[in-house]
Image (cartoon, rainbow, N blue to C red):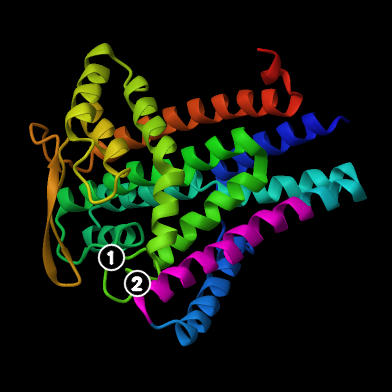
Amino acid sequence: MERIYLSIAALILAYLLDYLIGDPPGLPHPVRFLGRVVSGLEKLTRHQFKTPAGLKAAGALIVMIAAGGSLLAAIVLIEGAYRIHDLVGLIIELYILFTVLAGGDLRKHVDRVSGDLKSGRLNRARSSVAMLVSRDTTELNESGVSRASLESLFENSADGLVAPLFFIALGGAPLAVFYKAVNTLDSMLGYLNDEYKDLGYFPAKLDDILSFIPSRLTAILLVLAGGYEKTSRRGLRVLLRDRGKHNSPNSAWPEAAAAGVLGLKFGGPDYYHGRLKKQPVINAAGREPGPDDIPRGLELFRRISVIAFGCSAVIYYLFLSREVFAL
């Protein structure tokens, strides 16, 4: 079978597996290995670099080693596997593509929160949503839990699903692996506190750059997937007005679009490590989210997942067949 069809088959199977089973806890995952590598590199570089400039340089070095090494490893593994046998290549490419997609796992976590709330198990819902967000969850009421889960669902829909599919479409599994590695580095090092503001400077900036287009594509998909002219128009209106209401240059785009489409209010004050932090309010005219809004949000997420996958598969096919250059 031609390599192009094997690669497309690997993408289709990876998407279906991710949608159906998410990330099984017992399955070896490259991100966990990468996390250990990054932790080791952090300890090593902190011994060698002490000044702010030195730590920024160390952060850039970690990106080159961890993300660059991940890109190279993906290329070598996939090409080497196909040289052994088509079936071996298909399995390796499928596995790598499966590990860069996180939409199914995200959906399962949010669905678990929804189930806990429907069953009246608020404490368990608080524990479940704590796996999705960094804010304090022990005192959240049903509305607070619902808002936290929906905000996480749509913020992470960009970097967990749409962005990997975007980079797969542009360059296959290796480019998606590079993005996933940078995104992991940002989640580990890209904090604004005194400990990480220098070491995490380069990983955070690079992640912002790589996520720039996918976050905006996610917002557009959410508006288009609104289902009705009225909700889509409302989503676009809120998106244009509130897209900048976040510390990140990218995160508010999908949140604003989803808040508008669903008619909900996101953002506002939350506690982090016992300290109150006032966040900007997105779609202030919307109502407070409730447990019944989580299934609505999951349905909206499902729609953009299918659309994003379909677009990615078509563009990836054109890329592989080189027909794109004849357009």
97 inside magenta stretch: no
In x, y percent, where is residue 227? 33, 18
Q: Judging from the image, what secondary structure is the residue with disc 1 in?
A: loop
User: Mark 2, residues whose alpha carbon is within 10 Å: few (<14), some, or many (≥20)?
Assistant: some
In x, y percent, where is residue 23? 55, 54
Q: Quadrant of residue 223?
A: top left
Viewer-nearest residue: 200 or 2: 200
The residue drawn where x is 90% and y is 48% is: 83
Left/right of residue 80 with respect to residue 30 in the rendered view: right
Q: Contact (CB < 8 A) between labels 1 and 2?
A: yes
In this view, the residue farthest toward the left is 285
Mark 1 residue type: Leu
Q: Is residue 36 above or below residue 324?
A: below
Rounded to the nearest angstrom, the CA distance separating label 1 from label 2 is: 6 Å
Q: Is residue 193 above or below residue 269?
A: below
- What label sits on residue 196 in the rendered view? 2
Predominant secondary structure in magenta?
Answer: helix
Q: Judging from the image, what secondary structure is the residue with disc 2 in?
A: loop
Q: Quadrant of residue 219?
A: top left
In x, y percent, where is residue 285? 8, 31
Tell me where the magenta segment starts and ends, as one range: 51-77
User: Mark 1, residues whose alpha carbon is within 10 Å: few (<14), some, or many (≥20)?
Assistant: few
Left/right of residue 29 with respect to residue 140 in the rendered view: right
Check disc 1 and report the residue beneath it.
192
The residue drawn where x is 70% and y is 53% is: 74
In x, y percent, where is residue 14? 64, 41
Mark 2 residue type: Tyr
Q: How many marks?
A: 2
